[in-house]
Image (tube, rainbow, N blue to C red):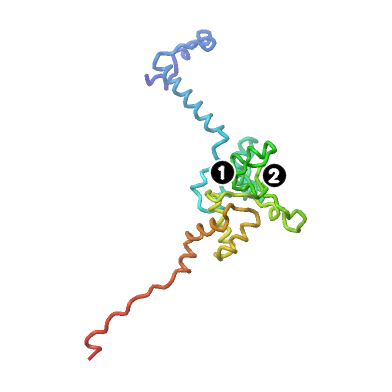
Amino acid sequence: MNSSFWIHGPECLRQKEENWPKGSDCKFSPGESGERRIIQDQISTFLCEARSNSAPLLDMSKHSCLNKLLRVTSWVFCFIHNIRNDVKRYGVISAEELLGAEKYWRKTTQGDVFVEEIAHLKQGKRVSKTSAILELNPFLDSDGIIQAGGRLQKSKFTYLQKHPILMPAKHHFVSLLVFDSHKKVFHFGISDTLMEIREKYWVIKERQTVKNHLKRCVMCNRFNSSPGVQVTASLSIARME
């Protein structure tokens, strides 16, 4: 393509305004129109990717800590809010914003795994008989998140203890959740980690899931490892005579 097109633009721009082409029938040279078409295709592709609702906000697999994931997500939401409302906001992330980020990843995780179940519950139907959460009597809350039913409505527990949020057994968010709960109980065993998780969540096959994740805990493996046993060498001749 002629480099003068990028410096000066098309020839019509250097003429008087009454000589400019009218309407959308602007005639460029073959090279110029081809480059113009490529640029328009690139812009259209970018807009389609930016407006896609199926893609998550961030790549969760790049984060190994739940708190860091929630903080980064909160700052991204703040940036989007500032851009849309043309405001500037400085300071720290509030607890409400962290809770909003956690709700976002709850819904994203369930949307990745419980697609069929969410579709049935939105239609007012029961989940299928082959679903792994059928026995938990699931329902959708006001935020569209699946929670477990149960018979503890008249108890004095908190709302999330009565109706914990359902989570799949295999997902990166569940891995972050298990390790975060494990750190909160100071690296105690499976039972203590499960008690911490059950404050908000109910993980499918939770005991086996927690057990598999705690096997990869570096600190627990370091302190629970057995000491090495070294075979005593034979005595030298000088010590035997």
Q: Looking at the image, which residue is at 56% across and 58% down?
A: 207
Looking at the rendered structure, the kind of residue marked 2 is: Asp
Q: Looking at the image, which residue is at 69% across and 55% down?
A: 161
- The disc, 1 or 2, on the residue closer to the chain's N-terminal end is 1
Residue 210 screen position, x and y as percent: 54, 58
| Circle on res. 171 | none
Residue ranking furthest to the top: 19
**Above or below for 223 versus 7:** below
Local packing at callout 1 (Cα closer than 10 Å; few below 14, some 14-19, many 20+) is some
**Above or below for 214 versus 147:** below
Q: Tags 1 and 2 in contact by the CB under 8 Å rule?
A: no
Q: From the image, which quarter does the C terminus lie in? A: bottom left
Q: Nearer the viewer, residue 18 or 84?
A: 84
Which of labels 1 and 2 is toward the front?
1
Q: Secondary structure at mark 2?
A: loop
Q: CA distance from mark 1 to mark 2?
A: 17 Å
Q: Secondary structure at mark 1?
A: helix
Q: From the image, which quarter does the N terminus lie in? A: top left
Q: Nearer the viewer, residue 201 or 223?
A: 201
Residue 7 screen position, x and y as percent: 42, 22
Classify residue 44 as left or right of residue 155.
left
Residue 232 screen position, x and y as percent: 32, 79
Residue 227 screen position, x and y as percent: 42, 73
| Circle on res. 141 | 2
Local packing at callout 2 (Cα closer than 10 Å; few below 14, some 14-19, many 20+) is few
Q: Nearer the viewer, residue 13 or 33?
A: 33
Residue ranking furthest to the front: 129
Which residue position is annotated with label 1? 113
Q: Nearer the viewer, residue 145 or 36?
A: 145
Looking at the rendered structure, the kind of residue marked 1 is: Val
